[in-house]
Image: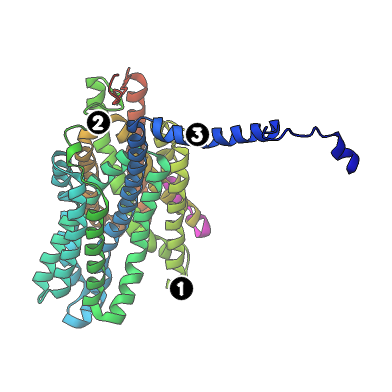
Amino acid sequence: MRGANARRPRAVAGEPQPQRLAGRRLARVRIALPLAGRFLMPPTDRRDSDGASHAVQQTRRTIGFLNVAHGIDHFVLGIFPTVVIGLEVVYQRPYSELIVLSTAMFVAFGLFSLPAGWIADRFSRRVMMAVFFIGCGLSLVGCAVAPTLPMLAVALFMLGVFAAIYHPVGMAMLIQASNARGRTLAFNGVCGNLGVALASGVTAVLASWLGWRGAFWVPALVCVAIGIAYLAMVADDRHETASRTRVAEIVLPRAAAITFFSLYTIISFCGGLTFNTIVVALPKIVDERLGGGVALAAVGGLATAVFLCGAVAQLVIGRVAEKVAPHILFAVVVAILFAGAAWAVRAEGMLLIAALAVVMAALYGQVTVGDMVIARYTADAWRGRVYAVRYFLSFASSGVAVPVIALLHARGGFDLVLVALVAVSAVFLAAVLGLVAVVTLATPRLHVAADPTPAE
């Protein structure tokens, strides 16, 4: 140790050692660089960074509220079909007479999507979504306090009017916020499916604890509270209405665009008819075709499992859609739907369950990828109205599905119903293949948005 110390040069008094001097200089540099970055960075850069962070937060909040809204939209529509079972005892009326009270609600749900999309495009999508939350809540209050059955029917009608807002307005907002990201659209679809799945169970529990009026009161308060939170946490968008782009991401020639949207009217109606037919008939198909001796609980469990296949497939399709051209994936998914429907016609036992699972997976998957196709060929300024027409046709088909099922089942059982489903699926597939041909053979041009950064 002594020898090692002796080899070191002795420092001259008052003169800093080289190592210390280098260390001090390095420390000064380390301190100076952040200070220079803080004081020499242009103020606009800091504002841009803060603005970008705020925009990301707003986008996440918006998407979160839209996911909740989709679940609520389907949940509130499922309250009365469960509550009506208890109303049979309260009012001493048959089920067939009481269930008719909801007819106007479902008609309004499809019909009023048209003005909702138009108003949102012209005024404010954010305000319309706030009207959705609070309007659904107040309509549910009306259902809870309705003194007579006619007043209950009126309140249900108003619920359908406000519930109609979500799909044309919410989907347009979701496409804008997520840039048509497949997995975001898929998760939003699963939230809607979750609302359908929870409606019956949650409503039954609330009705057993709080009575049938309580089954309306609780979701009413939840809707109003979320609507107030939405207004407080999501920024106003009225300044964006005039600046929304009026040119689609991919611009088709005029003739091709007319053909494209004409085919999409057929796609929307056939897709809605196929979806509503299989959703309404699924439990009874399983009950009749699975074989004798199957308990009702087992039938319900198998039907639920089939629906869950649809939800899982929707998430998978959302991820695949980010890597494959949406119109090509659309054709593949609808072709799988057609194959599954044809398989179900002759399938028996557990093979029938497998065939129905394929059908349900394709049905849910085509909704997500179909919305992505529309987004690519529709300008943001018109998107609310286009989605309004799409969902109007899809929901209007639900009014056709039930009487068609009843008529065909009376004439040939579910064998005839499934054959009709195959026929509708064939028309659906033909329209989608036509759409793919239009997009492929036309000479579209890619629209490049102008750089919003001002020139220096």
What's the distance in space between the residues labelled 3 and 1, CA to CA?
77 Å
Q: Nearer the viewer, mark 2 or mark 1?
A: 2
Q: Is residue 132 visible?
A: yes
Q: Quadrant of residue 148?
A: bottom left
Q: Is residue 60 left or right of residue 2?
A: left
Residue for point 30% across, 81% down: 209
Earlier-in-chain disc, 2 versus 1? 1
Give the camera-side residue of 114 and 235.
Answer: 235
Earlier-in-chain disc, 2 versus 3? 3
Residue for point 45% across, 47% down: 315
Mark drawn on residue 379: 2
Question: Circle 2 — which element?
Answer: loop
Q: Is residue 107 visible?
A: no
Label 3 belongs to which residue?
A: 32
Give the residues drawn in magenta, as a range: 341-352
The residue type indicated by label 1 comes to Ala
Locate residue 246, reporting x and y percent.
21, 28
The residue type indicated by label 3 comes to Ala
Q: Please identify the residue farthest to the top as the structure is shown.
A: 443
What's the distance in space between the residues labelled 2 and 3, CA to CA?
50 Å
Q: Please identify the residue farthest to the right as the structure is shown.
A: 3
Label 1 belongs to which residue?
A: 295
Q: Assess whether mark 1 and mark 2 are in contact (beta carbons under 8 angstroms).
A: no
Q: Is residue 25 left or right of residue 404?
A: right
